[in-house]
Amino acid sequence: MIEQNVKQILSELPEGVYLVAAAKGRDPQEVLRAVQAGVRIVGENYVQEAEKAYAVVGGKAEWHFIGHLQQNKVKRAVAIFDVIETVDSLATAAEIDHHCRQIGKMMPVFIEVNSGREKQKSGVLPEDVEPLLAEILRLPNIKVTGVMTMGPRCRHPEELRPYFRETRRVFDRLKGLCWPNVEMAYLSMGMTDSYLIAVAEGANMVRIGSKVFGERTQIDTQG
Ligand SMILES: *Cc1c(COP(=O)(O)O)cnc(C)c1O
């Protein structure tokens, strides 16, 4: 039951930890129910799906993009989303900046870290985050406000702990930089099976799908 799930998760999350309800594969009515039960941030992996949910839920929630953003979807994405959590290249950042400038929007973005150092995975390697940030901060319509990671697919969530820990180290280092346009505030990591470990390792934003909406039939954690 979505309502009960939301209430339980919200009551158990420590103060200062934000819940992002990861809504991929859910219909707009389910997203609306989650929001009416207290979810304040909805995470979407696909622009088209987000547009459908947005048409129903609209400004009752904050919208975070958490999937892989294709260049040709950026224009539509910046129209809806309040935060883009998965920036991992200068090209994507420049495209976001370009479209935001046209509509007079300042977009908060997170840098996605490939903490598992997996070849096929999106995100930047931990040591490449700072150089990317140095380039992004020249883009006037983007503000970097956080770091996000998925971590590798693991058999046991406990195996994710070192990847969360490394991402936290990246986050802390960036926080210490005091660069313009960088206001490091959010560390987004942890999903249904791993969010308690992520919170223990310093996450202040968790992205939870199954535990909010029920199990997905389709296996898809990458977006
Ligand atoms: C699906 C998804 C989640 C949530 O996964 P659950 O295991 O259903 O909680 C979190 N983050 C991203 C990027 C996702 O694609």
Image (tube, grey):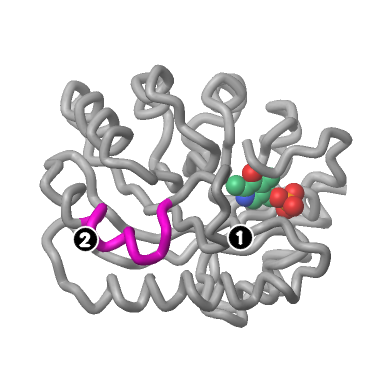
Q: In which quarter of the image is residue 67?
A: top right
> How far is mark 2 from mark 1, CA to CA?
23 Å
Q: Looking at the image, can residue 200 be seen?
A: yes
Q: Looking at the image, can residue 21 be seen?
A: no
Q: Which of marks 2 and 1 is nearer the N terminus?
A: 1
Q: What residue type is labelled 2?
A: Val
Q: Which residue is drawn at 57% across and 43% down?
A: 120
Residue 188 in the image: state x and y as whole percent.
Answer: 51, 61
Q: SS of the residue at dot 2?
A: strand
Q: Does the magenta stretch include residue 4?
A: no
Q: Name the residue under label 1.
A: 151
The correct choice, above or below, for 203 with respect to 28 in the image is below
Assign the magenta stretch its main secondary structure.
Answer: helix
175 left or right of 123 in image: left
* Mark 2 nearby-residue class (10 Å; few <14, some 14–19, many ≥20): many
Q: Which residue is drawn at 34% across and 48% down?
A: 109
Magenta highlight range: 124-133
Residue lying furthest bottom:
200
55 left or right of 152 in image: left
Q: Residue at x 48, y 43 (%)?
A: 64
Residue 190 in the image: state x and y as whole percent.
Answer: 63, 63
138 left or right of 204 in image: left
Q: SS of the residue at dot 1?
A: loop
Image quarter of the C terminus = top right
Residue 35 in the image: state x and y as whole percent.
Answer: 64, 44
Task: Looking at the picture, tell me which residue is in the foreground, 108 or 41.
Answer: 108
Q: What residue type is labelled 1?
A: Gly
Residue 154 in the image: state x and y as whole percent.
Answer: 75, 62
Residue lying furthest front:
119
Q: Name the residue under label 2.
A: 182
